[in-house]
Amino acid sequence: MLKRFLPGEYAKSVFHIYPHFLKEKGIKGIITDLDNTLVEWDRPNATPKLKNWFEMMEQNGIKVTIVSNNNEKRVRSFSEPLNIPFISKAGKPRAKAFKKAAEQMGLKKEEVVVIGDQLLTDVLGGNLCGFHTILVVPVSSTDGFWTRINRKIERKILKLLKQKGMLHWEE
Ligand SMILES: [Mg+2]
């Protein structure tokens, strides 16, 4: 049960995730969360550094789709200027949006990695679909309302994982 919350890898941020690392694992596509994974939840647009990260992935033939539980207005206005496909109101951790994103990229589950800052939505959902998963440290220390509630549960799961010696954050 707990294993479902265990990410395959951890990274300090998306900027610590490089194309060659993904390619070594046979990964050809990224499903990424938006809020507090790519930028702070209350920042409307991508930073120049993040634009470079997307370009680096594209140049290396790695596809990206943004899959967010946030509303269409937020996710569209962030993703469209970048020309990145997106799914809003995704209902993570449910499988539907994850599967749709992989299908749209034309990739098999072994070729997809889910990147996100939350165990309860991103990691759990990615694991249930059989994708690779990478947990990143949230960009911002503040969260929206529902995320704050999720974080409480998440902290309990993280504590349990640590107690069982399943989790090894490099701090
Ligand atoms: Mg998030």
Image (cartoon, rainbow, N blue to C red):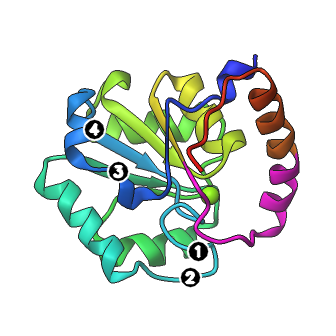
Does residue 156 appear left or right of residue 46 in this picture? right
Q: Which residue is mark 3?
A: 17
**Secondary structure under badge 3?**
loop
**Residue drawn 77% across and 69% down?**
144
| Mark sitting earlier along the chain (2/4) | 4
Q: Quadrant of the N terminus?
A: top right
Q: Does the residue tagged 3 have its C-beta within 8 Å of any atom of ligand 1?
A: no
Does the rendering let one see residue 28? no
Q: Residue at x 88, y 50 (%)?
A: 152
Whether residue 151 is visible to the viewer of this picture, yes or no, is yes
In the picture of the structure, the residue carrying the numbered disc 2 is 43
* 4 or 1: tag closer to the N-terminus: 4
- Calculate the distance from the C-alpha at mark 3 to the C-alpha at mark 2: 21 Å
Which residue is nearer to you in this view: 93 or 5?
A: 5
**Range drawn in magenta:** 136-152
Residue 31: x and y, percent?
42, 46
- Circles 3 and 4, Cβ within 8 Å, touching? The answer is yes
Q: CA distance from mark 2 to mark 1?
A: 5 Å
Numbered label attached to residue 22 = 4
Residue where numbered disc 1 is placed: 40
Residue 51 in magenta stretch: no
Determine whether label 4 and label 1 are within 8 Å by CB. no
